[in-house]
Amino acid sequence: MAEGGAADLDIQRSDIATLLKTSLRKGDTWYLVDSRWFKQWKKYVGFDSWDKYQMGDQNVYPGPIDNSGLLKDGDAQSLKEHLIDELDYILLPTEGWNKLVSWYTLMEGQEPIARKEYLKDYLLHASFYSRCSLQGNSHDEDLKSLSAAGEALRPANNHMSELGSRFKQRD
């Protein structure tokens, strides 16, 4: 077992890798994890092939999940503006978040940062302006027009690059 009674590092790596591939679905709750903490965790569990040499090394042990880099100074629950997926944070489905918290706990004084997934929020993900409407349409109109256009939800890890290429194709 790893530090703090956590699951074996191979199991942690495998479980989280599988959950990161989960597709975004309307109504699902996803959790933000600070990218700095997540990169440290990846080193510790040997997530990437080039980091296997540090796997299990206590010098790279990530400690409790620390999302302070995502929060406004002095405000334990207000997110900074203009956060970018994969640069500032990663998104984990509820099951992945629960596993990480059971293995590493959450930094004292912090609360989980959870977001419900809606189709239009998928397009506006980086800024987290929940319930904003696209082009002045209602939420239902946005869902219908995006569904009619054949939009499918993609895994959280790929959505920003896919959207960028779609916008370039429209030019």
Image (cartoon, rainbow, N blue to C red):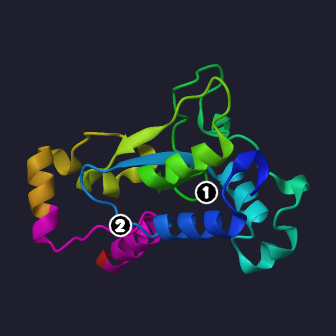
| N-terminal-most mark, 2 or 1 | 2
Residue depicted at x 51% and y 35%: 112
Q: Indicate the position of residue 2 as horizontal and vertical percent values.
A: 76, 56
Residue that label 2 marks: 23
**50 is higher (above) or lower (below) than 9:** below
Residue that label 1 marks: 87
- Is 158 part of what is drawn in magenta? yes
Q: Indicate the position of residue 93 as horizontal and vertical percent values.
A: 43, 54
- Is 69 part of what is drawn in magenta? no
Side (left or right) of 32 relative to 64: left
Q: Quadrant of residue 122?
A: bottom left
Q: Is residue 84 visible?
A: no
Residue depicted at x 42% and y 70%: 164
Kindly identify the amino acid type of the residue bearing the numbered disc 2.
Ser
Q: Quadrant of residue 119?
A: bottom left
Quarter holding the N terminus is bottom right
Kindly identify the amino acid type of the residue bearing the numbered disc 1.
Leu
Residue depicted at x 59% and y 32%: 71
The magenta span reads 146-169
Residue depicted at x 26% and y 41%: 132
Seen as rendered, the residue at the extreme top is: 74
Q: Is residue 28 visible?
A: yes
